[in-house]
Amino acid sequence: MTQETVLVIAAHPDDEVLGCGGTIAWHAARGDQVHVAIMAQGLFSRGTPAEAEQAALRSACKNANAILGVASLECFDLPDNRLDSLDLLDIVQKVEALVQRHQPGVVYGHWSGDVNIDHRLLHEAVVTACRPQPGHPVHTLLFFEVASSTEWQIPHSAPAFLPNWFNDISQTLDAKLRALDAYAMEMRAWPHPRSVRAVEHLARWRGATVGVDAAEAFVLGRRLNFH
């Protein structure tokens, strides 16, 4: 079994777990090195949070990713829900630096059609940073859905999320849900789509569509097979 280096690039704390937490735990369990980068601040879109709130979210992020078994976690401080206030090149360069440092074969990022502006711009940055130049390390580029963002987009306003890649997380769904419990301050009550119950229902449905107990769904951006 060939081990991979995996890079997950998410906009906000909890996006990484909502989008591919079960997949992160699956990669870690098989011995892959998983690096997670959170690019933007959390909480600031709701006003200026108290220092205690910021510290609690940072702690939740560390705990959630420890549950999933990540090799490294890096949190940046880009403006929350205001990535459109930055030049795209500045975001691209940060992603390029991550790719250069970790040399991942597999990269997971946001889908382009989400309601959230940070998700959309980070998608563009990831696509640009992972353009297939000679010698580039990334051979598999996948984009995840985020509950309460992806499905909230209006039809025809942006590309619909139509998954064509599924990872079986039947054995790691519990780890995903425990990681979301660590993010309790960010979760909502049922029937909000960003409730633990809704996330489990989505995983069960994605699994049922491909004949397994639970799955996470992705859109494949690019796959390069080697000889």
Image: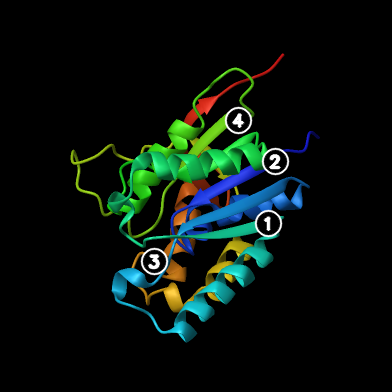
- Disc 1 or 2, which lies upstream in sequence? 2
Q: Quadrant of the C terminus?
A: top right
- Can you tell which of label 4 and label 3 is closer to the viewer? 4
Residue to which mark 4 is pinned:
138
The residue under label 3 is which amino acid type? Arg
- Disc 2 or 4, which lies upstream in sequence? 2
The residue under label 1 is which amino acid type? Ser
The correct choice, above or below, for 226 with respect to 3 in the image is: above
Q: Check whether the beta carbons of the residues at disc 2 and disc 4 lie within 8 A of each other.
A: no
Q: Nearer the viewer, residue 126 or 31?
A: 126
Q: Quadrant of the N terminus?
A: top right
Residue to which mark 2 is pinned:
5
Crowdedness of circle 4 by 10 Å Cα count: few (<14), some, many (20+)?
A: many
| Distance CA(mark 2)–CA(mark 4) | 9 Å
The correct choice, above or below, for 128 with respect to 184 in the image is: above
| Distance CA(mark 1)–CA(mark 3) | 25 Å
**Residue in the picture at 47% in, 78% down:** 54
| Distance CA(mark 3)–CA(mark 2) | 29 Å
Residue to which mark 1 is pinned:
72
- Disc 3 or 2, which lies upstream in sequence? 2
- Can you tell which of label 1 and label 3 is closer to the viewer? 1
- Disc 1 or 3, which lies upstream in sequence? 1
> Where is residue 202, by image quadrant?
bottom left
Q: In screen coordinates, is 207 left or right of 83?
A: right
Q: Residue 61: x, y in percent? A: 56, 69
Q: Residue 112: x, y in percent? A: 34, 41
Q: Check whether the beta carbons of the residues at disc 3 and disc 2 lie within 8 A of each other.
A: no
Q: Nearer the viewer, residue 210 or 65?
A: 65
In the rendered structure, find residue 194 and report the number of the disc placed on it.
Answer: 3
Where disc 4 sits, the SS reads loop
**Residue in the picture at 35% in, 52% down:** 118
